[in-house]
Amino acid sequence: MKRYLPALLLGILASPTAYAQQGVYSGAVRDESANPIGGVEVSDNLSSVLTKTDRNGNFKLNLSAGKHIINFRLNGYQETADTIEMTAGGSIGKTIIMQTASARMTDLVIVGYGTTRRRDLTGSVASVRGAEVKDMPAPSFESALQGKVAGVQITTGSGVAGSASLVRIRGVASISASGDPLYIVDGIPVTQNYFINGNNGGFNNNPLATLNPEDIESIEILKDAAATSIYGSRGSNGVVLITTKRASKSGLRFEFTSRVGTSQPTYKPQMLNSAQYLQMYQEAWENDGGTGRAPLPNNISWEDAQRTNTNWVDETMGVGLKTMYSLGTSYKKGKFGAYLGLTSDDNGSFIIGSRYRRNSVRLNLDFEPIKNLNINVNTSYSQGTNFRVDGAWSGGFGAAMSTALPIYPIYDSTGAFWRPGNGSLNPVAVRKLKDWRTTENRSIHNFKASYRINERWSVTASGAVDIMDFFEDIYEPRALINTDHAGIAKRSPRNTFNYNYNLLTQYTFLDNDKHELDGMAGTEFQRSDVKSSYIEVSDMAHALYKGESGGEKSTRIERQNATEAFAFASYFVRSNYKYKGRYIFQFTLRSDGSSRFGPNNAYGFFPAVSGAWIVSDEPFMRSFRRQNFLKVKAGFGRTGNTPNENYAWRGTFTPPQNSYGYNGQPSIFPTRLANPDLRWETSDVFDFTIEGGFWKNRLTWEISYYNKKTSGVILDLAVPRSLGFSSYYDNVGAIRNTGVELSINTRNIVKKAFSWSTNFNIARNYNEILDIGVYSQDAVSGGTNDTRVVVGQPVGTNYLVRFVRVDEATGRPVYLDKNGNETYTWTNDNRVAVGSVLPDAVGGLTNTFTYKNWNLKFLMVYKIGGNIYNSSAKRQNGVVTDWNMTTDYFDRWQQPGDQAKYPKLSRETSAYGLPPDPYQYNTTLFLEDGSYLRLRNVSLGYRLPSRWFGDKIQSCRLIFTAVNILTFTNFTGGDPEIARDFENPADRNMSSNITYLTAPQEKSYNLTLNLTF
Amino acid sequence: MKMRFLKPIMLLTTLSIAGAACNKMLDLKPENLTLAEEALNTPADVQALLNSCYDEFANLMNGSVQNYHELMGEHLSEPPSLAGSLYYSVYKRGTFSFRTADREYLDFYNCILRVNTIFGRMGSVPGIDAATADRLKGEGYFLRAWCHWELVKLWAQPYGFTADNSHPGVPIRLNADKSIELRSTVKQVYDRILLDLDSSIALIPESNGNYADRHAAIALKAKVLFFMNRFSDALDAANTVLNSGRYSFSDSLNRFASEVPQETIFKLVSTGPSDNRGSALINNYRSDNNPNPNLKPSKAFAAIAMQGHDRRSAFYEAKNPGKANEYFVCHKFDKDYFNVPLLHYTDLMLLRAECLLETGGDKTTAIDDVDRVRKRAYGTNWTPLDNLIPSLQLMDSLRLQRKLEMAFEGDWTLQQRRLGAKGLNIKIRNSPWNCPGLVLQFPQSENTKGFIFNEEGGCN
């Protein structure tokens, strides 16, 4: 009341005379982007608040004639003053532009089914601008987010072109269901199946690779239940909202970017050369009691072996070339806006023969055909072509690290490829003879119509389709596959047709100085169908992507596979209430129905309540001048997850037409046990966050705590096989994720010519499996028998036999049994939980320096803790088999008294106390600390002086970027950032840090030219 | 309520009604598969399900199971030590839960699950007459008994390993449900097998085409009883079959390459190269088109089997004879496809002879049984056994014939373990008959509370 007193007095004192001496001062307050700002306190030079702007930013004052200094004040904005000379009976209208104290506070943030101002958020949402994504040369947009957002762990796939990253938001809350966040592009949950092509060739297809980073305007990462529960059933592992570019400024504008770069491995595997190999192999032979020269693999004679020294690593890894050209055009006039983006991107990998080429076009249109009806149309088409080579376990560079021995030649004495029956032993021959590519034609189309019925009420209808046409073409000539046929061409088309539509309405119930209450309700339907087929033509002269003409074509097989489909039907409501502009509450509820559950569990309910208190807006905070912004928010809600399999709950039989029968008679048989009780995996999430700003937001910070308990965890259980089935889906057990996140942004130096800013973030996540029912740790396995689900331990626990030392007397490995006693015998009964693939903490540090036209940026990313299991080392540096070894194996026992890292060389599993199977040498000998610090990105930019170009060119920048040029780690097996090729979602959740002949990351140097005109 | 809220509420109501249509849109069914609840509607459906049990069973007894027994025994040479090879681990008698015959373990139980599904659901299928119901059940009991028997032979020590057979056997599954069963004792497993076989014998028809019939069930029972060393009962069962007049002894030596219908009591049916129920035998032994098959007779076995006077020596061939890299191959299974005789006259005849000797029964019949086999094998080199031959000597001769007749059919190692359990001092490839590694380890998936895994190793 007190603060309104001056206005009241003015009113009381207003006499006809006085009134006649007054004038009207009115206008609107806008931010830099012309968005209206509500709640701005408007005061005169006496510092008395006279009024506040309404939700449209408008204000109106009666002022006495004379000079006035009117102040406009709102937290998060720089205080703005306007000096006016009012005349009696006069009228002054103005638009006041308030500069943001920190752009973060007032940015419009995309949230589920709408936008909000950052200061009004009650949930945890991180935003990354598109410019930050596209400036970072990365194989796919999501890997450019690494180190930029607290609590978001991103592991870039590998240096193989087009490989998939691993994104984890606030830990892993699922085991057999997907642990990946939900990706939504302009409103549609896009197809994000990493296993559409299985693990073919030791590689998972990246469904996000065709999304063009140049098209991205912003990325919002929704982390807690308050933010994600509006996506209900699929929000458990976070939501990533991608918004594409639109025309935002008037006129015709162009942006052209071109980039050229190189690709090199961050690490080259150190394999033995021919002489070293022969020496080590012979040593193993003699250690086993062999006399004379050891018989060499594949009947290679010693003479030939000694004459040959093939460096297969060099034959499979080189320097790749990368080029990118992009042209963005935007046009805006009045209510019409159009954005057209064209990009051609060619990513050559250091893996020889591996390349990912992407051509894309996007057209986004906005117009208002009739008053209050806004139409947005987005259409995009991308073609991603992945030129494939075998990798990891499948050959190629994987063979170079394993079965391709240095004593094997590339060519035989006739000049033909040396091929001893097994083609994979000569990866060069396979690469050159095999024509292998995958092609993905991806088009995403969105339509949105919003009608504003009146000031308070609007209705929006939207729909989208995401069509992914995926083809894999493999051609293998006679020389490669030892067939009587001239060659076999195979094609595997997989078409995913994914669509959604929704209808929602928004209504503002209250909008006054004290109360703001609005509500939104909507319904949505989504369906995705995957059709696949297979074509195989024998006696072809080339791959089928070149057409079917040519060659003899002796046989042609075409098979149509069953269509797989899933659907979601959803209802949702959201209500926001704001009191005095600083007490904010939000309630959301989503009900999702899924075809992946039976009728009794089809629908799940996912509510969330959250609130925020902008403490710095309290009068009592005005004396804390240094602390200019302080906000506290908390939320509690529930999110969910579904199994990846579409029909997991149904019991099914294979019908006669799909079975071979017996005795010439038809047969049918059960293929899956029904589980009608299969239900949603649910996560109950509590989140508490404090954010603040000091010294006019020169320092802003945010600290969050969360606690997420996931129940009814969906497991594809390896059930006792005596049931007659090997697995079925069930809700078993619980997982807890608890964590703390901290991010700090500072503007250390802000001068006209020089500025320096820093962003630091760190996130600690604690993950624990609370329960797995009656099942053992082996109910779900990951990796190569090296990670397990263990109660009391994190998801992806390394469950291994402990190796303690090499016996100095005998050279045998010494293990510990379950009770900690030393033993020579390896048995899986002695496995214990010894590590975890999940890190203790992850984060990033960005420093940006600007000096006149120069800009220098460093991004360091780091991971603290977490283990790496070097699963291929157990065969490289274990029992000597048909694999090459690494130079690390030099440190082995050779004679009594030797203190060595590795046991004596032997070809006998019994010498290592193993069962007759060297694959099983899973011990802590190959478990290492996964911590690292990496200089992820250094970029040096220079903006060419505008005077050089005149008016026609607004900006011309040259940027040099170096990626992954420095890594600090104790990991001995290569690159510590590992996302292996995975077999299924459970493997993806549990084995992120297991390496098995995995390609290293890419080191690249890039030069970018950016022109706007 | 104020009128201004009316419109939004009406709209919400409309949305809800529109959304209700979504329930049907969520009812998505898999293509190319039949929903379990819609799968069994007619007698033909149940018959097709039963047919799939034979299919599953045939894919196990196509040599896959027999090969494991042979690998653990002494008739094969060491298979290639390719890393991770299951055959190598089995040969080394070193299976463990990550490397064991988990496919076979699963598929036997899958076959049992299919049988149990028939038992559980056939009552609700209309139109099954009493005779058909009896036949379906009789065949179901036959297959369930056999599956349990094969499981207990591979994953448990033999009957007689403990005096009361209280040593752990395998889980017995009698229902198509998800309840977890732990291992029953070997006694319980054998009791169940005999119970199922008696049920089968009571219900199954006398004649049943290529499928199991009453004599097949009795023949199987004879073999089961024989492996329990219950010779008198086994003799009765064997005589029932041998004296039925339905089967007779043949002069044909190779039951695989050329089928011997009059000897066959139960066989797996192959209809062509792509429907080959002997594939695991052919793929691993066949040597006419592959100089280096996976499985090769050991030198010791070749020394016994490659006797000039024995026509069966034609089944074997020495490669690189006399050289350091000499090895042997088996031609017994050299054919694109064949029917696999699993129960046959020769086997039961030798079984009868052994039972007669064990029980002190009619020695003349025993001699005659053995001599018929010898005569067929030795042809013009045959000399009849002396009627006064001592029983022990006759037994040796009998067992030699069994060893040679049934070579690589998965029989001899099991006979050795049976004899060991009976009290003989038996060593199998220099290891005691009861060393732990002669029993396969269970798959890791069985690791549930209370499940007892087998002891590992211990066989050299």
Image (tube, rainbow, N blue to C red):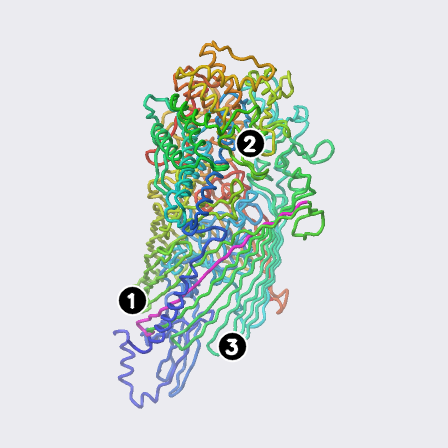
Query: Which of pointers 2 and 3 lies earlier in the amino acid sequence?
Result: 3
* Chain identity of mark 2: A
Q: Residues within 10 Å of mark 1 (few under 14, many from 20)?
A: few
Q: Residue at (44%, 14%) from the top-left corner?
A: B363
Q: Which residues are magenta?
A: A511-538
> Residue A369 has which mark?
3
Residue sitting nearer the eye, A877 or A490: A490
Residue A415 picture quarter: top right
Check disc 1 and report its element: helix, strand or loop. helix
Residue A958 spot, x, y in % from top left: 60, 57
Residue B209 spot, x, y in % from top left: 50, 37
Amino acid on which the number 1 mark rests in the picture: Pro
Q: Are marks 1 and 3 in contact (CB under 8 Å)?
A: no
* Chain identity of mark 3: A
- Give the alpha-carbon distance from disc 1 to disc 3, as whole Å: 46 Å
Query: Which of pointers 1 and 3 lies earlier in the amino acid sequence?
Result: 3
Magenta-colored stretch includes residue A108 = no
Q: Is residue B394 above or below residue A507?
A: above
Residue picked out by circle 2: A886
